[in-house]
Image (cartoon, rainbow, N blue to C red):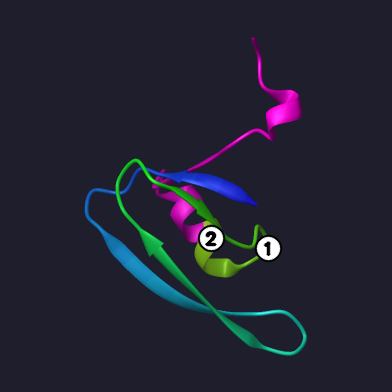
Amino acid sequence: MKYLYCGPVPSSVSLIVGDDRLCQDVLMLPGMEVEMPAEHEYTRTLLALAYLMPLMPHSQTIH
């Protein structure tokens, strides 16, 4: 899922994702769009801290 990173400082993280436990590296700069797995614990933590804001898919944007 795509999010807008609104954290106070630049950050990066390596997430272990999927059944085959692949590594997904994510670079996060304030105001940057990032893609992270919605079900990952780290994603949920950043959402709870209001460091991530979900982005609507283009088909759902309000014009």
Q: CA distance from mark 2 to mark 1?
A: 7 Å
Element on which disc 1 rests = loop
Magenta segment boundaries in residue numbering: 45-63
Residue sitting at the far left: 9
Residue 60 is marked as: none
Residue drawn at x 69%, y 35% as measured from the top left? 57
Residue 43 is marked as: 2
| Magenta segment includes 62 | yes
Residue sitting at the far bottom: 20
What type is the residue that disc 1 sits on? Glu
Q: Identify whether 56 is placed above or below 40.
A: above
Question: Which residue does the numbered mark 1 point to in the structure image?
Answer: 39
| Magenta segment includes 41 | no
Residue drawn at x 38%, y 64% as measured from the top left? 27
Q: Position of residue 8 (x, y in %)?
A: 23, 48
Element on which disc 2 rests = helix
Q: Is residue 58 left or right of residue 34?
A: right
Residue drawn at x 73%, y 79% as measured from the top left? 18
What type is the residue that disc 2 sits on? Thr
Q: Position of residue 1 (x, y in %)?
A: 65, 52
Q: Are discs 2 and 1 less than 8 Å apart at CB?
A: yes
Q: Is residue 42 left or right of residue 51?
A: right
Q: Residues within 10 Å of mark 2 (few under 14, many from 20)?
A: some
Residue sitting at the far top: 63
